[in-house]
Each structure stands twice: as C-alpha cells, then as structure tokens.
Image (cartoon, grey):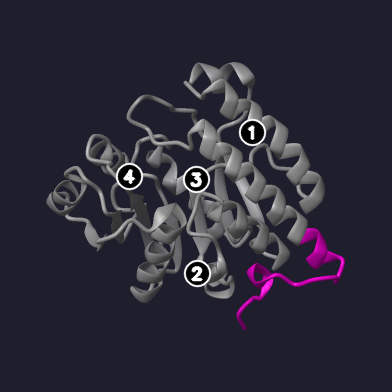
Amino acid sequence: MRTKKKTIVVMPAYNAAETLEKTVDDLPKGLVDEVILVDDASTDETVKIAKNLGLTVFIHRKNKGYGGNQKTCYRKALEKGADILVMVHPDYQYDSSLTGELIKPILAGRFELMFGSRIRTRKEALGGGMPWYKYFLNRLLTPIENIILGVNFSEHLSGFRAYKREVLEKLPLEKFSDDFVFDQQLMVSAIAAGFKVGEIPVPVRYFSESSSIRFIKGGKFLAQTFWTLFLFLLFRLGIYRSEIFRFKK
C-alpha cells in the first residue's frame, strides 16, 4: 500500500536494542517513505542496530527526556518534507503493523490527528500485561479528560499516534515539556486549536522489555496532566492563555 502523501515514521528511542528490529519488521512494507530514529543517549546498541536496519538516525549526546526526544523527531521529519508523521515507540509495546489503519482517516481527510487506543475491555487490557495501576490511572483519568476537553475517547495515554503535517506546524511544540507529559500537552493543545482527533483500537502488549512510566514518576505525570487541563479551562474561559496555547500562524 502506497500513499501519495510522504509518510515518515519517527521513533523516540532510549535503550531499545532488544525490541527495535521487531518493531521495524512489523511496519507495513511499501507504506512508509522513511523511518527516523532519535536516540536519547542510550547506553546499549540501539544506534548500531538502527543503522544496520537502514534507519535515519539522529543522536542526542545528552538525555533530553521523552518530550525532548519527540521534539527532535518531529523537527527532523518536517525538515524532510513529511506530509504525515507517525510516532511508533521502538519498545514493541504498540503494534506497528497497524500503521496503515492509523493513517487511513488522515489520508481520507476525516481527521488530522489519530491515536491507537488500548482500552476496550478490562480483561483484554490486564490480560495483555498492562499493570493494574496503569489501568486504574487510565480509567480514572479518561472520563475526567473527556468531560473537560469535550471529547469521548476510550483512552488518553496512548503513545501510538499519527499527525497531519499542519498539526505539528501550528502547535507550539518547543513550549511543551521535555518530560512524559509532552503527549498530554500536545493532545490538549491540538484539541484547543480545533484539530479533528480520532482513535482506532489496538492490541495491548506489555512485557519486561517495554518501557513505561514507573509508579513514582506516574504521580508527577498525573499532577502535570491535571495542571495542563486546568490551563485548558482557563484558556477556554478567556481568563489566561498559557504558552502551550499560543498557536503559530
């Protein structure tokens, strides 16, 4: 399957040597024009493996964090003329074989931002290895975000996402956090900017090699997420416009 739009997959990587090749192998053949991997100062052989696989590799000499890594990913992909950008974690937690399904609604003009939702049933989520506290956090946070943002998604914490170029050009990416809350800020900012967001179901796949936010960091992430939602309410009410809602023209 080929598209007329230039599609680039970006992979924010940190110590992904054990899972990178499997993730790349699952990408649909002939769909993606280029795969960019940004290595965030890994201490394993992520860079060596990525180069052997023929990926375009950029290296952070110092760790810039999950959000900082994504900023480089998107900047490099936009510089290379990507029309559609797909973020795939190289830790094999998300099924990259579904990349074609993820971008179809964007190609059809129905949505400008898509993500893969792992939450269909409790049995499926926990059976796929999702830690109970992450499932609980997801179920707690999702209805709150839906109410505040005026949407009705089944999940808000997915890291498998696709963007139309215009989304990343308009949003103030450099003003977002370099930490894990980057994804939340981007999604909230995109909704505030009026972009159409959709979701597709994807399998749940957790195992020891997959990266995820640990329990203590999860508390910080939760606090930062609620702060982002509070800033969204202030923006919607016309009381205060945070820099994460200062859209580019």
Q: Is residue 244 left or right of residue 158?
A: right
Residue ID at (54%, 42%): 158
State which region is magenta.
232-249
User: How far apart in space, not on screen, are marks 3 and 4 (Cα)?
Assistant: 16 Å
Q: Which image quadrant is residue 245 in?
A: bottom right
Instruction: Identify residue for label 2.
Output: 165
Q: Amino acid at mark 3?
A: Gly
User: How far apart in space, not on screen, are marks 4 and 2 (Cα)?
Assistant: 20 Å
Instruction: Identify residue for label 3.
Output: 159
The earlier-in-sequence mark between 4 and 1 is 4
Q: Amino acid at mark 1?
A: Asn
User: How far apart in space, not on screen, are marks 3 and 2 (Cα)?
Assistant: 18 Å
Instruction: Identify residue for label 4.
Output: 27
Q: Marks 4 and 1: which is nearer the front?
A: 1
Instruction: Identify residue for label 1.
Output: 138
Q: Nearer the viewer, residue 18 or 169?
A: 18
- Does the magenta portion include 244? yes
The earlier-in-sequence mark between 3 and 2 is 3
Helix, strand or loop status at disc 3 = loop
Residue ID at (67%, 57%): 188
Question: Residue 68 at x, y = what percent?
Answer: 43, 60
User: How far apart in space, not on screen, are marks 4 and 1 (Cα)?
Assistant: 27 Å
Q: Quadrant of the C terminus?
A: bottom right
Question: Residue 103 at x, y = what percent?
Answer: 49, 53
Q: Marks 1 and 3: which is nearer the front?
A: 1
